[in-house]
Amino acid sequence: MIFIGKKSVLCLVAALAVLALTGAGIFAVCATVEALVVPVGAVVAIDAGHGGYDGGVVGVSGTKESELNLELALILGEALEARGVQVVYTRTEDKALGDTKREDMKARAEIICGSRPDCVISLHLNSYPDKNRRGVQVFYDDTGRGSSFASYMQERLNAAINYKYSKRCDLAPQAGDFYITKCAPVPSIIIECGFISNAEDESLLKSKAFRRELCTEIAEATLSAVS
Ligand SMILES: [Zn+2]
C-alpha cells in the first residue's frame, strides 16, 4: 500500500507534558499529527463535481459551481503533474457524464476505479443559508478511510487559506456517506473549496490567482511527505 499514516509520538508526548504542567488543551499544542506519503509517480484521480445540466450550487453573483469546479480541477491537475504525479480526471469539459445523475455518478466511479488511483480528490463548492459562513472544508468517507488524508489536508488549508483569508483555522474535516469517496478502496476526499453563498469567498474563487494559490496548497499537501 502506498499511503502510510505517520503518527507523531513525540508530538503527543509533548502535548501530554504541557497538558500536565499547564492544563492547556492538546489541540493547541499538537497541531500536526498526521502526514500522508504519496510517492512521485503515484496516480491521483481528480473529480470536478457536477457539469453540464447539473450546475451544482449557484453563487451570490450567479457563479456556477460546476464551472469553477472544473477550473480548479484542471489547475490542481497541472500542479500535481508538475510534481511528478499522474493525474486522471473524471471530466475535462463542462458536461455531465450521463443522461441522469445516477448514470453520471456511475461513469465517474468507473473512471476512478479503472485508473487504479492512489488517492481521489473530488472538488466542490459549498453553499449555506447563513451567508457569513466561509472557508475551505474537507470531507471523507464514513468508513474512516481517508481520515488521515482529510485531517492533514484540512490542517494545511486552515493554515494557508482559511486563516489567511477569513481568520479561521478551526474548520475540521467531516465524515459522511458519499458516493464518490466509495468508488475506489483508497483514501478519497471531497474538498469544498469555499462558500459561494458568501460574497467574499465567491469573489476569491473567481480570481485565477486565488485558484492557483489554493490548488498549489492542495497539491503540495497531497505530496507533503515526499522528499
Ligand atoms: Zn457540489
Image (cartoon, rainbow, N blue to C red):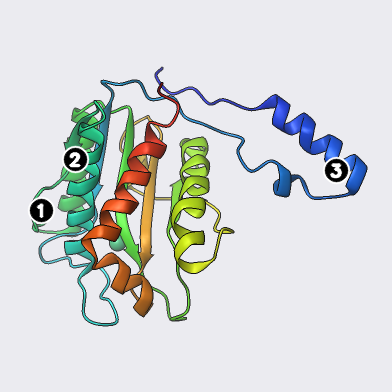
Residues marked 2 and 3 touching at CB (< 8 Å)? no
Q: Where 223 sits versus 61, above or below?
A: above
The amino acid beneath tag 1 is Gly
Q: Which residue is mark 1?
A: 98
The amino acid beneath tag 2 is Glu
Which of the image's four quarters has the N terminus? top left
Q: Where 135 sits versus 12, above or below?
A: below
Rendered image quadrant of residue 32: top right
Q: Residue at x 20, y 71 (%)?
A: 64
**Label 3 secondary element:** helix
For marks 2 and 3 on the same chain, the one whose residue lies earlier in the sequence: 3
Taking the image as drawn, is residue 94 in sight?
yes
Q: Does residue 145 appear to the left or right of 15 in the view shown?
A: left
Find the distance from the CA under tag 2 to the CA under tag 3: 43 Å
Q: Which residue is mark 2?
A: 78
Q: Where 140 sits versus 127, above or below?
A: above
For marks 2 and 1 on the same chain, the one whose residue lies earlier in the sequence: 2
Residue 23, image x and y in percent? 88, 49
For marks 3 and 1 on the same chain, the one whose residue lies earlier in the sequence: 3
**Label 2 secondary element:** helix
Q: Which residue is mark 3?
A: 19
Taking the image as drawn, is residue 176 in sight?
no
Residues marked 3 and 1 touching at CB (< 8 Å)? no
Q: Residues within 10 Å of mark 1 (few under 14, many from 20)?
A: some
Residue 217, image x and y in percent? 37, 45
Q: Residue at x 15, y 44 (%)?
A: 107
Find the distance from the CA under tag 2 to the CA under tag 1: 26 Å
The front one of 47 and 225 is 225
Residue 20, image x and y in percent? 90, 40
Labelled disc at residue 90: none
